[in-house]
Image (cartoon, rainbow, N blue to C red):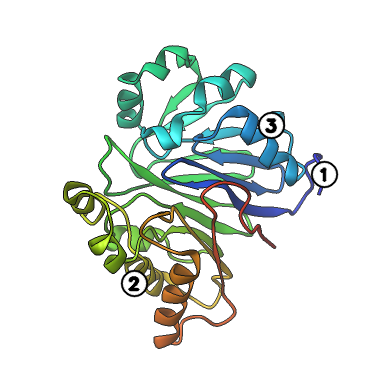
Amino acid sequence: MGDQKESMSFRLCTLASGSEGNVSFAEYRNTRVLIDAGLSYRALCEFLSEIGVAPESIDAVLLTHEHRDHTAGLPMLLKKLSLPVYTTPGTFEGLSEQKLFERIPKAAFHLIADRASLVIGDLTIRTIPIQHDARDPVAFRLDGETVHFAVMTDLGNFNEDQTESLKGLDALILEANHNRNMLETGPYPYPLKLRIDSDRGHLSNEAAASLLRKIWHPGLKAVLLGHLSRTNNYPLLAQETVRQMMEETDQVGSMKIYVAPPRGLSDIITF
């Protein structure tokens, strides 16, 4: 597909997914959004060009939280493009304490509350409050007329409200950050291990599969595992752990399981 937006298209992928940077791209019909902005503008343009997308065709940026690996590219992105940025009041406050905030046009921000919804083009977007060590972090569910998908990363645990919010999806980007044994025996200092493994840290491979078991249905076509640790995980290990746990309960069906690289274009979920 070239730069021109085409009717009835759906694409979902990551341009970066890890502790060094996070950006997801979603397209449905005539609407294109970025979830997070943790890449330099140059890298963003480079990866978007690989899928035939011009940066100026993006309609909005959705910010999940204020951590730098999700926001570092905002100043240059908003200098180059006049884009609205949607995020929670807590994320905005957290950003205001960072030096990069001085270079961000404040008028670009539109603040949305927990569990709020908004319409951007062909998509209805809903926030899902999550547990993470940030001010007011959220995941996003995006619903079009014929497709339903979500981006769910950077959470240390999940609850019933979150699983209910993820029911009926066609596609999902889901965190599978670490293997528990690799984290426990790995080189990280003990306080960092505790943070990662806490309820406000990151989902393990096993926890990702447990969440997926709760929301799986035969219509869930594809899952892209993201935010993998370079130190405490392997792509094949994450993929096989999730696949095996889903197969134990006969919950795979025709669902594809992909793994996002820490930097660069992931597999593209499209239908």
Query: Is residue 235 shown above or below 23?
Result: below
| Secondary element at tag 3 | helix
Task: Identify the image quadrant of residue 54.
Answer: top right
> Tag 1 or tag 2, which sits nearer the N-term?
1
Foreground of the two, 159 or 153: 153
Q: Residue at x 27, y 54 (%)?
A: 187
- Residue on which the image places disc 2: 210
Confirm or deny contact between disc 2 and disc 1 (CB under 8 A): no
- Residue on which the image places disc 1: 2
Query: Is residue 229 shown above or below 234?
Result: above
Q: Residue at x 50, y 70 (%)?
A: 236
The amino acid beneath tag 3 is: Pro
The amino acid beneath tag 1 is: Gly
Q: Is residue 109 visible?
A: yes
Task: Identify the image quadrant of residue 56.
Answer: top right
Distance of label 2 from label 1 (alpha carbons): 38 Å
> Tag 3 or tag 1, which sits nearer the N-term?
1
Distance of label 1 from label 3 (alpha carbons): 13 Å
> Tag 2 or tag 3, which sits nearer the N-term?
3
- Mark 3 crowd level (few <14, some 14–19, many ≥20, 10 Å Cα): some
- Residue on which the image places disc 3: 55
| Secondary element at tag 2 | helix
Q: Classify residue 269 as left or right of residue 138.
A: right
Q: Classify residue 205 as left or right of residue 4.
A: left
